[in-house]
Image: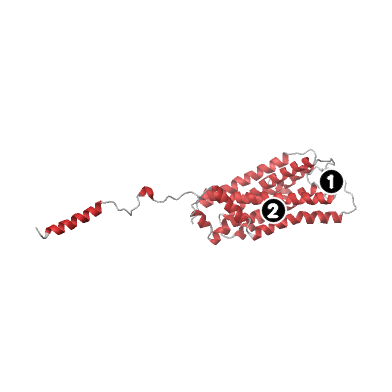
Amino acid sequence: MTTQGPVAARGAAVQGRAAAPDADAVPPEASPVRRRAPIGRLLRAEVRWIFRRPRTLAVLGLLVLLPVITGVAVDLTLDGATAAPVDAGPGGAPGAGGGPPIFVTMATSAFVLPLGSLMTLLMLLLPLTVAMAAGDALAGEQSHGALRGWLLAPVSRGRLLLVKTVGVLVVALVAAGLVVTSGLVTGFLLAGTDGLVSMSGTELSVGGVLWRLAVAVAWATIYLMAVGAVALAISASTEHPMLVVVGVLGGLIVSVVLMQIPALDWLHPYLLPSSLTSLVDLIRDPVSFDGLVEGAFRAVCYLVIGLSVAYARLTTRDG
């Protein structure tokens, strides 16, 4: 009796402590819950990070300088010469059918310089800018291990692609806007407000010029986003940003070469660069929107396909 009493008491105490709830234990409902990162904060961080990259700032600075250099060079080359602005030929390109080339018209029209510079830079340098941004967005961060931090935020892969797409969109819009703004200011300084002449020979008001330039910037942004979507699809499949740039520029160069082959006329409507000449319609009076609408529709098709491939690659990729 005397030996079993303390043992029984100790057993009861142990059972009591086991049955009593632990004060330090955290109930399941009180465990910390991982919350989704706010989309607004993610977008601000992405845009801030994009414009802190030195190469992005260097390319944007070059885009600002090129219209200035072009305008000054044309003005010095054609100083004292008169180039009467007449309508472009039926082929749609300036200079066809006896009309003056677009850079000759820049000597007397401040309106032509921003659009001519935009058309020229859309051939190579503007797509290069967007391809660099798209390459850094996924492939660049993947190579440096920064992309894993997004997934730990936590950020779903669909939201990740959305943030990166908006970042590329901002780069495209800023790049196109800088080119047109720089060209317009340079044109005003060289030709003055009296040089707002269309290629049809009609005088345009400042308001009429500004809305045409706004349409040009919007159209160029859609075109560049199509290039950016293809670049994002490549960027989601590799860890090498330079491969993204080479792939995009190589595809554009091949497309331009294919456009010069008459036997491939059936293929030309499917090539993205085939719509660049439609920007010339904004210099005419009145403006014809048929080519612009067709080019925008083609770019949207590339945009949807590119983003779909990028999303499929991100959601099925390990890591």
Left-right relation of 248 to 319: right
The one nearer the camera, 275 or 220, is 220
Which mark is drawn over residue 106? none
Q: Is residue 209 visible?
A: yes
Left-right relation of 49 to 71: left
For label 2, the residue is 126
Residue at 82% x, 46% y: name it.
96
Mark 2 residue element:
helix
Residue at 50% x, 54% y: name it.
151
Residue type, numbered disc 1: Gly
Q: Say above or below: 6 vs 170.
A: below
For label 1, the residue is 195
Q: Is residue 116 visible?
A: no
Q: Position of residue 267 (x, y in %)?
A: 68, 46
Residue found farthest to the left = 1
Task: Report which quarter residue 289 is drawn in.
Answer: top right
How far apart, in angstroms, are the residues tagged by discs 1 and 2? 27 Å
Residue found farthest to the bottom = 144
